[in-house]
Amino acid sequence: MSRAPVDLTAAEVTRVVRAVLVPLVAQGAIVRRPRMTAWAERRQSDREVRRVLTALRDRYDGAPLALRAGTRRLAVVTTADDVRRLLEGTPEPFSAATKEKRGALAHFQPRGVLVSDRDGRRRRRPLNEEALDAGHAVHEDATAFVAAVERAAGELERTVQAARGLDAGAFLRVWWRLVLEVTFGEDAREDRRLVGVLSALRRDGNWSWFRPRRPWLLAELERRVARHTASAPPTSLAGRARDADPDEAPGQVPHWLFAFDAAGATTLRALAVAAARPRVRDRLVDELGASGGPGEGTVALLPYGRACVLEAVRLWPTTLAVLRDSTRETRWGDVTVPPGTGFVVVSSFFHRDPARLEHADGFAPEAWLDGRADDDWSLVPFSGGPASCPGRNVVLLVASHLLARLAGLGLAVERGQHLAADPLPCTVDHLGLRFVVRTAAAIVGGDRPGYGGTGPGSARPPRRGGLR
């Protein structure tokens, strides 16, 4: 049974704000701020999140931790049972369209299903599930998507050969072309202006209600999305959505693009682990090589590749916090929680909880293969319950196929000694990852600053680069 939320002392509120909320806001919930992600890695900020929340959970026997943030009353939950209650109780009595999310996402996707009211959700959720083919591990149009992955992998291979390596910036440029092709078809893959406008509006979204809207920029984004959607082939995500509901389809697309950005970060981190661990790399390559036969549909499912992607997002969540707002008075323990109370699930705390997970700081894709992780409500790489991400399977399909192909390029990751064995660092800045061709990897494992503050700090410059 849920315990009643407990009001934290002033000192405890200060610790939670400083260790949990400030790093979350500083890094950017909608688009990562490069300087702040580098700062978070140097400080290993997720380690401090776990330390503070574990101590408070133990002190208050798993009760939600209540505090005020401005005019908002928030409750940070600390048990898996409370996570399950919030996720299963969405959208009523716990709405995913929280005040913070409505303020943030209105900058670039005001009609997205995630911030829709009850009537809008009834129309838009089925459309998202139809376009994203949410019920199947292999999307109906997976052949077209994997063809796009193969083109992207070829581009990245040429980049590696020319530069004798790969950094996050080069990877993400190709990743966005892949995302545009999967979403709109091949003719859209060079629309860098669309990506630039979306990124600018997402940076505004980091500030939620505190940043004035730029309606002229939103109008440009919507024009570009509408034009690409109108001409998209039926084997693209936007084409499927258009054919299902031409009026609602363009309004849903920006969220798919937003979510694919997080998938790119996860693919980079999974590749870094594979580059540091020969057994992981070899298994990815072998699975792809053995996948000549059809899987579900016409494209092979890559179970181990999918598990590696899921494990990377468990270890380094891209959704920093899962948020819900109570829509009415709700009984919680022996108290009544008023409507408008915000509930917070801090992903990094649950995903690495040693009290519940034997492999809390280890790389254990096997937990996704044998069902242990999928049965755990506190592991929320794609949220859960009725509001779980309908794009989970299409993201895993694209990311796993690209990961498997890149694993075969013979890359090593700089500072790979920190990823080669468990325990893994709590915070990894994906924007700072650099890979070199293994035969030229003289600096890998050398005397360089390490994760966790044991050295003088990372000297690499910041690089440019989601909230569920």
Image (spheres, rainbow, N blue to C red):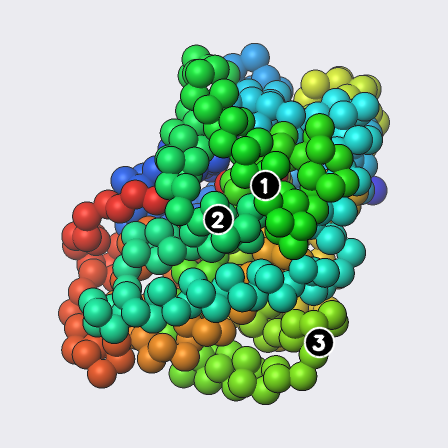
The percent coordinates of residue 434 (x first, y second) are 27, 62
Camera sees residue 48:
yes
Separation of residues labelled 2 and 3 (CA atoms): 28 Å
Q: Is 46 above or below relative to 441?
A: above
Residue at the image point whose x is 48% and y is 68% from the top: 150
Q: Earlier in the sequence, mark 1 or mark 3?
A: 1
Q: Amino acid at mark 2?
A: Asp
The quadrant of the image that shows the C terminus is top right
The quadrant in which residue 306 appears is bottom right
The percent coordinates of residue 398 (x first, y second) are 56, 61
Separation of residues labelled 1 and 3 (CA atoms): 30 Å
The quadrant of the image that shows the N terminus is top right
Separation of residues labelled 1 and 2 (CA atoms): 9 Å
Closer to the camera in the image, 144 or 330: 144
Where is mark 1, residue-wise? 231
Where is mark 3, residue-wise? 295
Side of 112 relative to 91 (left or right): left
Where is mark 2, residue-wise? 187
Camera sees residue 309:
no
Side of 254 relative to 112 (left or right): left
Residue at the image point whose x is 41% and y is 72% from the top: 406
Side of 328 relative to 77 (left or right): right
CA neighbours of label 3 inside 10 A, class few (<14), some (14 to 19), many (20+): few
Give the label, 2 or 3, closer to the camera.
Answer: 2
Closer to the camera in the image, 190 or 130: 190
What element does badge 3 sit on?
loop
Q: Amino acid at mark 3?
A: Gly
Tell me, yes or no, whether the two marked residues, 1 and 2, touch with CB atoms within 8 Å. yes
Q: Is 37 above or below relative to 408?
A: above
